[in-house]
Structure formats: C-alpha cells, structure tokens
Image (spheres, rainbow, N blue to C red):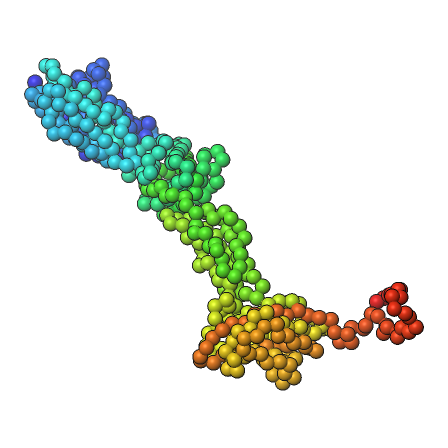
C-alpha cells in the first residue's frame, strides 16, 4: 500500500478568504488533513491513505500568486520522511516504528504543533502528530536576553487588520537595544510603535511607517513594548527586529572634581549633571553632561576641568587669582596678564596669601591702571606672604613673568574698596575737633543723613 507525501514549493493566497483544503480520502467527507490560507502552510504534508482530495476556493476580491505543490507516492515500511519546517530545525534521521523526530524554530518564529513526533505501528505507518510549522506570530511575551521580533508571515507579506503587541520583559537593571534589519509597511496606515515600558504607561521612543529603515533604538527600562497595526488595504513585507539586552549601569562618577564641584548625584541613563569651579578657576569644557544610551555608559562630552589660567579679564568686586596650573607649580616661560576692573568709585586692595616664586627671575608686577603706562604700584617675588598693595584706580593690570628655571606658585586675593572723593560724594561731614574733656569721659555723637543722600 502507498500513501501520498505533498511537498509545498510555494503558497500565497488571500488571507482568510482564499483557502486550500486537503482531505485524506476520495472526497470532502474524508478526514481533513488541513485548511490553509495566506502564506502559512507546512513544507510537507502526509496522507494516511492512497487517496487524496484537494479543494481550493477563492472569493471575488484580491488575487495572489497561488500555490505550487508536488506529490510523491511512498511505501509504508516506515513513516514518511518529515521535511524540516521552513525557518526551523529538525533533529532525527530514523523513521521506523518508535523512532522520534524533534523540531525547533529559528529565533522570531514560534512552533505551531508538537515539538516531538513518533512513528506509530499499524497497517499504515504514520506519525502520531502532523509535521509542525514555524510561523511568525502576531505578538507575544519575550524573556530571553536576545531575540527576534517578526511581522506575521515574514518574509512574506503580513495580513490585513493586524493588532499585535510584543513585550520584552527582562530582570530589573537591564534595558533593550533594538536593531531594525528589515522594515517595510504601508505608509501612514500600517505602523510600529515602540514604548520604553508597558503598553499603557510606557514612554513612546519611536513610531515608524513606510519603507525607510529605522535607526537603532535604546529602551532604558526592563520592559519594552512593540506594537504593530495594519489596516484592511495594502500589505507589505513587514519587519525583522533583533533585540539585545544590556545592563543599565550608571555613567562614571566624575567626583572628586578638582578645583570645583559637581551639581547632581543621579548618574543613570538620560540624566544630566553640571559643573562649577571654585573662585579663581575657569571651567574648560562643557558645563553640563548627559549620560548617553548605549551598550556602554558614557557621557555625551568629556568631563570638563577647572583650571587656573594664564591671564584674563576680571570684573567681580572680590576674587582670587592663582598662578597658572595652581595648585601645581606654574610652567616656565609664562607672561600672563590679568586686568581687574571694579565699579567706579572703588579702589582695589590686593593681598598675597601665598607667594613662592623664584626670587628676582619670577615676579608679579601691578600697575595702577589698565595698562603698563599707568604708575607701577608694586612688584613681588620670592617666598614671602601677606604682601599687599592698594590702587587709586578702579582698574589694575597684573603681570606674571617666569623664566626657564625654577618654578613655584602664588595666590592673591583682591577686593574693591570705596575711595572717598572718587566718583561719589562723601556722605559724612569732617569730624570737628573735640576739646575740653577729661580721662574716662563719655562722649556722645549724633549722625544725620540729608535727604537724597
């Protein structure tokens, strides 16, 4: 006795409306082996009798490529050889009574049917279950650290009127990297939406439609949702998306931050911190950094530095000036100029809190004005501190010079002081001479301010 083995070469019909029915006998009253529509059909179909009845029906609307089937009559000494499902793997090459063959699918496809089949005894050798299929399903729950999401029917066209949701759920502390390998949908009407989080409360991080391949995406929560919707009209190939878990580590902590401080303690993905320098230092770099998405954690810019620069224009009423590179020793061959300007009516008081330079050859010069044509009011060098000088102008020029040999450092502070008669009227009249009092006398003063002063 012989039975039929049907090998499916190609199959494409209008999904749900145009179908092919196979019956294990001479007419439609015989047991039905299967009813197939769209692009989903086993690669191999086996009958259990020597008759096979095929019934194809189509409606009045959409046409498709149809199908191409080849059949072979085989003897019943053993079970018919089961072909490997499309997009799957078959394990086992013996088909005698009691032999077992197992199946599994490629990533992104789900096994429809039984993963193990056994060759059964009897007058007709047959498998105890039909050969399974590997299909791309509409939605699902994914928990592996890597995987594939496919549109239903991929690589064939997806069906109409789909409403599919895939959820990738990983342990807390992991996010998902999405890489789009294929993407083609009907523009506007068929689309994919990606959320970082659940379908109801997650943040939308991407919405895609049309033929353009989306750029990679990073979801920064342990749950990621992919939603796909198609309408009733045009169908396209759809999509193939590879996902990979990555650990949601924080960006490197820039602390300790030399000569300054960091504002903000949250170093996780998407968060921003900022930097400020101590008085006398200048920020070199970006003042704010954001922790980037990605497999490895990095800031969007290099961490800035707070540096004591060689010269500058200073307008604060009070401040500090450091030798270049402080607290490290200053470099050789420096000629640095600082112009300090305070509001009119003020002079400037300078005090050296640290002064350790090479005597004579490395020195600081101060002019009582904005340039070197102004009177020089001081030159400082050596290893002394608490040196000070006053200006009579609201601007001073400070120059630091170093030669090619010994280095050192210095720190000076300054502040603006009110100068009587310099751009503002004195508020108090001169104090009259006090006469005729004895030791231990108590003297009372009365101060009044005229209107408008």
Query: What number of labels is visible?
Result: 0
Residue at image x 51%, y 63%? 306
Q: Is residue 77 left or right of residue 199?
A: left
Residue at image x 64%, y 81%? 377
Residue 88 or residue 124, whichever sits in front: 88
Does residue 156 appear in this view? no
Residue at image x 64%, y 70%? 414
Does residue 333 appear in this view? yes
Q: Is residue 235 left or right of residue 51?
A: right
The quadrant where residue 349 appears? bottom right
Vertical placement of residue 417 versus 18, above or below: below
Residue 1 or residue 107, whichever sits in front: 107
The extreme bottom residue here reads: 373
Quarter occupied by the N terminus: top left
Q: Is residue 166 left or right of residue 36?
A: right
The extreme front residue here reads: 439
Residue at image x 61%, y 79%? 366
Residue 99 at x, y percent in the picture: 13, 23
Q: Is residue 428 left or right of residue 56?
A: right
Residue 94 or residue 52, whichever sits in front: 94
The quadrant where residue 5 appears? top left
Residue 13 at x, y percent in the picture: 28, 31
Residue 61 at x, y percent in the picture: 34, 31
Quarter occupied by the C terminus: bottom right
């Amino acid at each position: 006795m012989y039975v039929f083995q049907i090998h499916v070469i190609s199959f494409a019909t209008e999904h749900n409306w145009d179908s092919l029915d196979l019956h294990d006998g001479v007419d439609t009253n015989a047991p039905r082996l299967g009813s197939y529509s769209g692009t989903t059909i086993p690669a191999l179909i086996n009958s259990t009798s020597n008759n096979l009845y095929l019934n194809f029906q189509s409606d009045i609307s959409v046409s498709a490529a149809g199908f191409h089937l080849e059949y072979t009559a085989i003897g019943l000494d053993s079970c018919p050889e089961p072909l490997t499902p499309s997009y799957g793997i078959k394990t086992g090459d013996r088909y005698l009574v009691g032999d077992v063959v197992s199946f599994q699918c490629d990533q992104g496809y789900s096994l429809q049917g039984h993963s193990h089949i056994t060759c059964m005894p009897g007058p007709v050798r047959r498998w105890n279950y039909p050969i399974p299929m590997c299909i791309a399903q509409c939605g699902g729950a994914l928990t592996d650290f890597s995987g594939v999401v496919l549109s239903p029917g991929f690589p064939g066209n997806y069906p109409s009127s789909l409403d599919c949701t895939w959820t990738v759920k990983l342990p807390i502390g992991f996010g998902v990297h999405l890489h789009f390998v294929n993407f083609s949908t009907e523009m506007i009407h068929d689309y994919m939406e990606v959320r970082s989080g659940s379908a109801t409360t997650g943040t939308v991080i991407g919405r895609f439609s049309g033929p353009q391949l989306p750029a990679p995406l990073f979801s920064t929560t342990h749950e990621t949702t992919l939603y796909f919707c198609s309408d009733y009209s045009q169908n396209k190939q759809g999509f193939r998306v590879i996902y990979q878990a990555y650990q949601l580590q924080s960006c490197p902590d820039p602390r300790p931050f030399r000569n300054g401080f960091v504002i903000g303690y949250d170093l996780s993905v998407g968060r921003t911190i900022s930097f400020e320098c101590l008085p006398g230092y200048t920020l070199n770099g970006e003042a704010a950094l954001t922790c980037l998405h990605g497999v490895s954690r990095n800031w969007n810019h290099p961490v800035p530095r707070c540096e004591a620069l060689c010269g500058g224009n200073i307008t604060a009423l009070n401040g500090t000036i450091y030798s270049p590179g402080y607290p490290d020793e200053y470099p050789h061959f420096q000629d640095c100029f600082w112009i300090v300007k305070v509001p009119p009516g003020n002079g400037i008081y300078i005090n050296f809190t640290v002064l350790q330079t090479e005597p004579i050859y490395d020195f600081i010069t101060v002019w009582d004005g904005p340039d070197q044509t102004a009177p020089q009011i001081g030159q400082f060098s050596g290893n002394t501190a608490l040196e000070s000088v006053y200006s009579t102008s609201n601007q001073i020029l400070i120059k630091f010079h170093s030669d090619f040999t010994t280095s050192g450092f210095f720190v000076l502070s300054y502040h603006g002081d009110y100068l009587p008669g310099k751009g503002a009227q004195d508020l108090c009249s001169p104090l009259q001479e006090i006469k005729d009092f004895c030791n231990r006398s108590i003297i009372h003063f009365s101060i009044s301010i005229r209107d408008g002063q």
